[in-house]
Amino acid sequence: FSSSSSSSSSSSSSSRPPATAPSFAPPPPMPPPVPLAAQTPNPHLPMSMGGVGLCPLNPDGTLMMQHGEKINRELFIGNTVPETSDAVLKAFLNAAMSRVGLTLPNFPHYNNGQPIIQVRVTSKFAFAQARTEVEAANLLNLNNVPFMGRYLKITRPKNYTGVKTRAVTWQELTGIPDPMAPIPDDSLTVKTSQTITDPNDKVFRELFVGNTTEDMDDEGLRAFLNQTLAQVNLCWEGNKEPVLKCRVCGKFAFIELATKEDTALAMNLDNVPYKDASLKLSRPKNFPGRRTKHCTWNEILDKVMKGDIVAGGPTPPIEYEDGGGPDGPP
């Protein structure tokens, strides 16, 4: 090449603007983690989780739904009513969480500021998906919230294997007592350090009834249990109606009895058949008292057939698992 052509080429190239890389708008940054205390402004809430990650974002700023994280943001909701819909339940949960300060205040532009992004309702239960893991943990504090005449049972799904979070019930959160609300599973609630010693306290007179069905109602189940207890002479001091209250909540129920002795005797109805189901009677998981021995329903029938239990005869004795008497362990 000649020097002139080289000079011309150099002059031409120097007059062109420098090449630049194509410009692309960077994706919106993922929201920074927020301290849990700032995420849950309600001062009555327990510290539920640590090291919680928020959902990542798509390039357009919408929340990215990653399959691996969905299980951490999804909750099971039991005891729903067949008449409800996805939209109605979703709106109710969002309103309830907003009312008591369970939403993340730092990200109002994600999902229009609403913590629940999806609800799927079936005839007997539902699943709710939150936009973040923190708000899923916060949603647990709506357990026992009244909805359309029922109390919603809000728990983690059975296949959840993540961090267990602490929560309170709706009644504890709002400070509004409700004697008709079911006693929650103690694995979902903060355990109290208070020792209950009064033998007449409700906690000593209540039983959990599992395997109930949708066609069972409060008064019908209460009447059946009272009649059955009377027929096999399991009524303390001749009281023919030891079951005072009954609360059916879909697949389970709670019954309240007159005395702690009536409660111990009623345990013998475990597996009693009622409306094509075998009822499972047991103490609530948060029962703080002494455990009593009891039979199953078939064993009680066997005692009746052998004459060990006679109508109008003495009530079977109450025996304690620790071997002690009514006044305490040996």
Image (cartoon, rainbow, N blue to C red):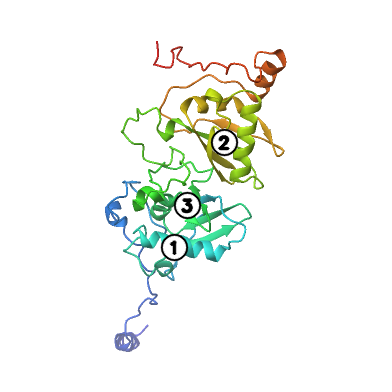
Say which residue label 2 marks. 209
Q: Alpha-carbon distance for marks 3 and 1?
A: 21 Å
Q: Secondary structure at mark 3?
A: helix
Q: Which residue: 35% across, 46% down?
A: 48
Q: Point out the tag, 3 or 2, that comes first from the N-terminus.
A: 3
Residue at 62%, 40% in the rendered image: 221
Q: Position of residue 240 (x, y in %)?
A: 58, 30
Residue at which label 1 appears: 94
Q: Which mark is residue 68?
A: none
Looking at the rendering, in which quadrant would you find the N terminus? bottom left
Measured along the vertical axis of the image, is residue 322 above or below residue 158? Answer: above
Q: Amino acid at mark 3?
A: Glu
Is residue 254 visible from the viewing direction of this image?
yes
Q: Nearer the viewer, residue 270 or 117?
A: 270
Determine which residue is flagged by label 3.
Answer: 69
Badges 3 and 1: C-beta atoms under 8 Å apart?
Answer: no
Determine the image quadrant of residue 31. Answer: bottom left
